[in-house]
Amino acid sequence: MKHISKIAFAIILSLTFFACNESDTNTGEDIQNTSQEIFASKTIEIFEELTTEYFPKEDVNFVVYKDKNGFLMAKYELIGTTKKEVQMGSFAKTERRGDGGTTCEGKWSCGKAIYKCLENDQDALISEGACTGRTAYCVTCQDPK
């Protein structure tokens, strides 16, 4: 019985040692994946904010992709009936946003910035990293393609 308990103790000790060694190897890729996961999660939160506060869910499309430098971007666009309504009213709108973008930090501020783009019959791009250099997000309006 003593022999079995010594073997069991040795197995548990070795498994604990190997488990600790594997979890201690943190690479830059893990950090980058975490950053990308946070960005993807934020884009979903923003989509939910847009579709609960401003537009019907079926009239907003968004896609998350990597730009040519490997940074994550998300593009939001209106489709369907809402897009047609915005286009019909867009002749009265004269305000166009510049290329500088709007810095935002959360689903409400980013959702509001994206809403302004979509209401002006433009697509909205959101990227990680602020427009002014702080750590946040940048929303830029662009003409639909």
Image (tube, rainbow, N blue to C red):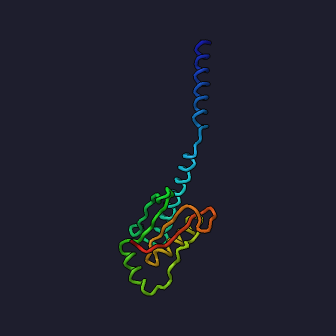
Front residue of 69/101: it is: 69
- Seen at 52% across and 63% down, the residue is 127
Q: Quadrant of the N terminus?
A: top right
- Seen at 50% across and 75% down, the residue is 116
Q: Quadrant of the C terminus?
A: bottom left
Above or below, comparing residue 115 to residue 4 in the picture: below
Number of numbered discs visible in the structure rendering: 0
- Seen at 39% across and 75% down, the residue is 83
Front residue of 46/75: it is: 75
Above or below, comparing residue 54 to residue 38 in the picture: below
Q: Residue 71: x and y, percent? A: 51, 57
Q: Quarter of the image holding residue 122? A: bottom left
Above or below, comparing residue 90 to residue 25 in the picture: below
Q: Residue furthest bottom?
A: 92
Q: Residue 102: x and y, percent? A: 57, 71
Above or below, comparing residue 31 to residue 105 in the picture: above
